Each structure stands twice: as structure tokens, then as C-alpha cells.
Amino acid sequence: MHKTFTAILLLMLMLVPQLSFAEEPQEGKSAILVVSFGTSMPEAQRAIDNLVNAAKKEFPSSDVYLTFTSNIIRRKLLRENFEPLADIKNKSLNVNSEMFDKIMFLMNPVEILATLNDIGYSEVCVMPTHIIPGEEYDEIKNVRDSFANLRGKYGFKKIILAEPYLNGVADCDRMAEILAARFRNYLDENSDTAVVLMGHGTPEHIANAMYSQLQLSLDKLLYGRFFLGTVEASPKIEDVIANLKRHPEIDRLVISPFMIVAGDHANNDLADENDDESWISILKANGYVKIEKYLVGLGEDENIRDDFVRKIQKAIDR
């Protein structure tokens, strides 16, 4: 297995220089690099594609690329794409080709930024799809700062990092309004219904407090109708249930991921009824038997998409 990975990586290293010099450098051009944790589930990819396509539509003068930060997901996709990569080993491709985009997609953020520099892009906006400025966001910020400190031909004229979705009270208030609109039909029709949201969470990081701030914003807007927890940090599902018990009028639940994609966490940790440790099983064990699943990633929401574009524009203006 290790030899296979090595062969794939060597192939990519051979391909990138060929692609970089396939046509005239893109001197003076700008790029938007969308950075996502990623997913290996094709149906979940729709949420990420929606954001990427929105960036392409709203910023036609910039070329838009995508990279995943998860090494595990990238390696899985690399294995699945080994054959098409091998097929083009000896071909010369221009920088706008479909296969070039696929190869760029399989690079980590450091590799793809280095390649963009090599092609000749002078300005790059790095746009994360992260919900909070947690550990994953910090790592992307370190990468951006490292490239920003480079001078000369290996550096960019300008490289900026946009903000994540929740980066303060105003962002949480806006997200509360988006969530209220997203679940309006469920909440308006049934006064005994509440929405349980599963966020990812980032343990031992100050940014995890954004989830608590969002809960405050949701309570301010629609008290007792939204209950937010995380799968990796706090508040935990036990905290969600404790808060639910304070509202005996709640008899029905809608469970949904508070994540850009409805991937592994949504389908397994949240909604797997055959897993005794999933949230749906725990909720049922605590007496909540009327549960509806809404397994749609936030990235598929038009308001989330619009906010994504707004974050890019804000970064560019700044």
C-alpha cells in the first residue's frame, strides 16, 4: 500500500511541472482557492460544488480552484483517480483543462498554492468553507501567512484569507436568521417541533465558543426551537437532551447536520438508527420517538451560498 501511494505521488510530481508550463504563464491573473475539509461521498459533494460554482459565477475574472484539507479523504480520492492520472502521464495539458482541475483538486493547500505561483497567478484569495475559526482554520492561516512572507518570484503579490462563517456575534446572528429560514416550514407548522443540529466541534480551542454564541443567537430569535450540539467537543448530545427536557412542550424533532456537507458524521454519528451511540438512537432512548431526518449539507442552502460569496467579496475589499 505504501508503495502505491509513493508511486501516485511521484506521478503527480512529474505531472505538475508539465502542466505548469503547458501554456503561457497567467501573469497578473487572480485566483480564488476554496478550501474544504472534504468528503468522499459523491452525494455530499453537491454542497461543496454549490459553493465553488457560486464563486465562479460571481467572480468571473478569477479562476476558482478547490482543495481538501483532509489527508485521509484526499488519499482515498487519489486512489480512485490513479487510472485517469496514469492515462495522461505523457500528455501536455493547458491550465484550464478539466484534467488539470482534477489534479489540482487532489493537491493539499501547500502544493496547490505553490503550483498557482508557478503558473504565474499574482493574487489569490483563500476562501475556507469552515464553520468556525478552529484548528483546521488555524492550519490554513499558517499556510497563508507562510506564503505571504515569501518575497520575489516564489511569493504572491497579494494573498488574502477570508473569514469562516462564524467569526463573531454578528455572524452568529446572521446564521441564526439563515437557520430560521432553512427550517421555517417545520417550525411554523408545528409548535411542538424543535430542530436539533449537530456541529463538528473543535476540542480545547477557544473558537468552539462560537457554538455557544450561535445558540444564544438562536434563542434570541426563536427561543426553545433550536438545540445545537457537537460531535467532537461541547455542547455534547447529553447537553442537548438536558436542554430539551426544559421544554416539555417539544414532542417532535428534526435532526440535521450543522456542517457544510452531509457526509459521514451526518449519516452515521447523527442518523444511523442501527448504531446505539448515534444521536438519533440516544434521542429515542430518551423518549423522543417522533424524529425526522433532514440530511442536507449547509452548502446546498442558497443563503449559505450567498454568505459564502459575501465573505469572499469582504476579503477582497479589505
Image (tube, rainbow, N blue to C red):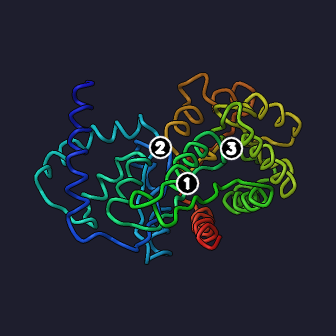
Kindly identify which residue carries mark 3.
197
Query: 64 or 175: which is nearer to us?
Result: 64
Question: In the rendering, which numbered label is found on residue 69?
Answer: 2
Tag 2 near tag 1, CB within 8 Å: no
Foreground: disc 3 or disc 2 = 2
Find residue 309 and report its horizontal and vertical position in percent: 57, 68
Q: Secondary structure at mark 2?
A: loop
Q: Amino acid at mark 3?
A: Leu
- Residue at 79%, 61% (x, y): give it: 170
Label 1: how many Cα within 10 Å (few below 14, some 14–19, many 20+): many
Q: Amino acid at mark 2?
A: Thr
Query: 296 or 311: which is nearer to us?
Result: 311
Q: Secondary structure at mark 3?
A: strand
Find residue 287 and report its horizontal and vertical position in percent: 75, 29
Q: Residue 173: name its quadrant.
A: bottom right
Kindly identify which residue carries mark 1.
128
- Residue at 53%, 33% (x, y): give it: 268
Label 3: how many Cα within 10 Å (few below 14, some 14–19, many 20+): many
Mark count:
3
Q: Residue furthest bottom?
A: 61
Q: Amino acid at mark 1?
A: Pro
Task: Say whether disc 1 or disc 3 marks the residue closer to the N-terminus.
Answer: 1
- Residue at 46%, 74% (x, y): give it: 57
Task: Say whether disc 3 or disc 2 marks the residue closer to the N-terminus.
Answer: 2
- Residue at 44%, 77% (x, y): give it: 60
Task: Say whether disc 2 or disc 1 marks the residue closer to the N-terminus.
Answer: 2
Query: 22 or 79: which is nearer to us?
Result: 22
Find residue 275 and report its horizontal and vertical position in percent: 55, 24
Tag 1 near tag 3, CB within 8 Å: no
